[in-house]
Amino acid sequence: MSTSAVPVNLAERLAQFSELWSQKKVAVLNDYEVKLAKLKGEFVWHTHEDTDELIMVIGGRLTIRLRDGEVVLEPGELFVVPRGVEHCTVAEEETAILLLEPAGTLNTGEAGGPMTKAAETLDSRCCVKLRASSDRPPRTTSGDTSSLGPSPPWHR
Ligand code: NI
């Protein structure tokens, strides 16, 4: 890890990617990772048998469904999903979250399936990252993004 004294600016890091449901590592502490993700829609029900999972909302609004209820997080709010507790995240609008959990924790926990994705590292040097066209998310012809309203505050 770099020891350079440079802050991690969450807004800048969020501006580096648009991919949904993909965790991006922005910091490491001991054997834990701090990750960012953008969500929209409904994830899969899953459980992390070996670890708690901290989820904090930066922008947007997140519902964490639990089998015995649900938790709604607004920006600046966090919730720790206890280990072994089944949960499913739902975001009606595009929502940016910060995750804190042990390195190697899979997004789908024990559930597996097509949404399973290992966390990726964001380039920490510059917020303006030029990407190959193959890295861009597929454009949808049916989706009218203008109906989504103004860009979320983390989009600059
Ligand atoms: Ni989880």
Image: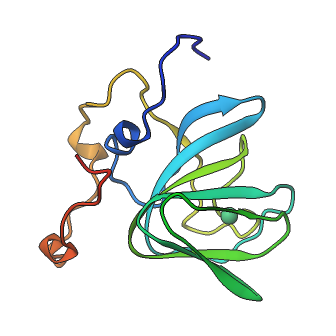
Quadrant hosting residue 59: bottom left
| Image side of residue 121 versus residue 116, left or right | left
> Where's residue 126, x and y in %?
33, 24
At horizontal 23% and vertical 31% (from top left) the residue drawn is 130
- Depth check: 121 or 13 in front? 13
| Viewer-side residue, 25 vs 139 | 25
Ligand 1 image position (quadrant): bottom right
Q: Where is the N terminus found, in terms of image quarters? A: top right
Number of residue marks: 0
Q: What is the x, y in percent for residue 96?
A: 44, 57
Q: What percent of the width, then of the height, locates residue 125?
A: 39, 20
Q: Residue furthest front?
A: 76
Front residue of this view, candidates 125 and 58: 58
Note whether 104 is above or below 80 in the view shown: above
> In the figure, 71 relative to 84: above or below?
below
Report the residue that reaches farthest toward the top: 4
Question: Is 18 left, or right, of 116 in this rendering?
Answer: left
Q: Is residue 102 left or right of residue 50?
A: left
Q: Position of residue 66 (x, y in %)?
A: 71, 81
Q: Quadrant of residue 70?
A: bottom right
Q: Quadrant of residue 85?
A: bottom right
56 vs 111, nearest the viewer: 56
Residue at 77% x, 29% y: name it. 30
Residue located farthest toward the bottom when viewing the structure as drawn = 68
